[in-house]
Image (cartoon, grey):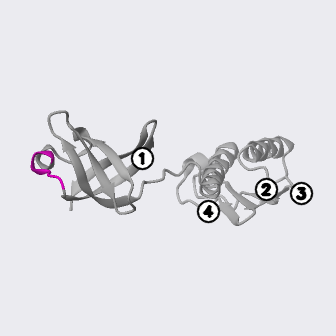
Amino acid sequence: MQIEPQIRFRGMEPSPSVEEVVRERIGRLERFHDRITSCAVLIEAPHRHGQQGRLYRVQVNLTVPGAEIVTGRPQQDEHAHEDVYVAIRDSFNSAQRQLEDIVRKMSGHRVKAHPETLRGKVARLVPDEGYGFIAGQDGREFFFRRESMTSDQQWLTLAEGAEVSFSEHEGEQGPYASAIALV
């Protein structure tokens, strides 16, 4: 972390054991994003509720380049939050999920890329062997198998010269097509 985290207590006495747990949870967050620029944690025990104990609220404010995370909105009737450590756990778990989402979006490598849908015409067909070739609009030729058709019925009606849409892939022996459908 680039600056010292701020840990504040409101409506309760500061507790070294609570502060230690908060610092440990902040350390865990740093494993997900090494450029946390600020962190402020507010541990609050607002007031007593009738026959219930105190309902603790833990607000975590994190700032990373390009994003800000705020957790710990007041929850009504969250009896588990009568324990300050449960409130800390829930708020930091929420911050961790949001931080993971931010990292995932920024890195882009975990987002599945869908191949572009291309168009072409069936150039050659070898029905007895169950394969053929598609001439793409850019002049390249794509190999395909019968199993790559979107339905068996389309394979039965397929003929040379038929217009098709398909997804392009790169194989060991050159480009091939999948998800082939008649246009």
Q: CA distance from mark 4 to mark 3?
A: 24 Å
| Residue 167 at least partly seen | yes
Where does label 2 land, which residue? 36
Residues at circles 4 and 2 in contact by the CB criterion of under 8 Å:
no
Where does label 3 land, which residue? 3
Between label 3 and label 1, give the one nearer the viewer.
1
* Whether residue 30 is situated above or below residue 64 in the rendered picture: above
Between label 4 and label 2, give the one nearer the viewer.
2
Kind of residue indicated by mark 1 = His
Q: CA distance from mark 3 to mark 1?
A: 47 Å
Where does label 1 land, which residue? 169
Residues at circles 4 and 1 in contact by the CB criterion of under 8 Å:
no
Membership of 156 in magenta stretch: yes
Q: Earlier in the sequence, mark 3 or mark 1?
A: 3
Q: CA distance from mark 4 to mark 2?
A: 21 Å
Q: Residues within 10 Å of mark 4 (few under 14, many from 20)?
A: few
* Whether residue 95 is situated above or below residue 63 in the rendered picture: above
Q: CA distance from mark 2 to mark 1?
A: 39 Å
Q: Position of residue 130 (x, y in %)?
A: 20, 36
Kind of residue indicated by mark 2 = Ile
Residues at circles 4 and 3 in contact by the CB criterion of under 8 Å:
no
Q: Earlier in the sequence, mark 4 or mark 3?
A: 3
Q: Position of residue 104 (x, y in %)?
A: 60, 52
**Who is closer to the viewer here, 149 or 162?**
162
Q: Which residues are magenta?
A: 155-160
Kind of residue indicated by mark 3 = Ile
Q: Residues within 10 Å of mark 2 (few under 14, many from 20)?
A: many
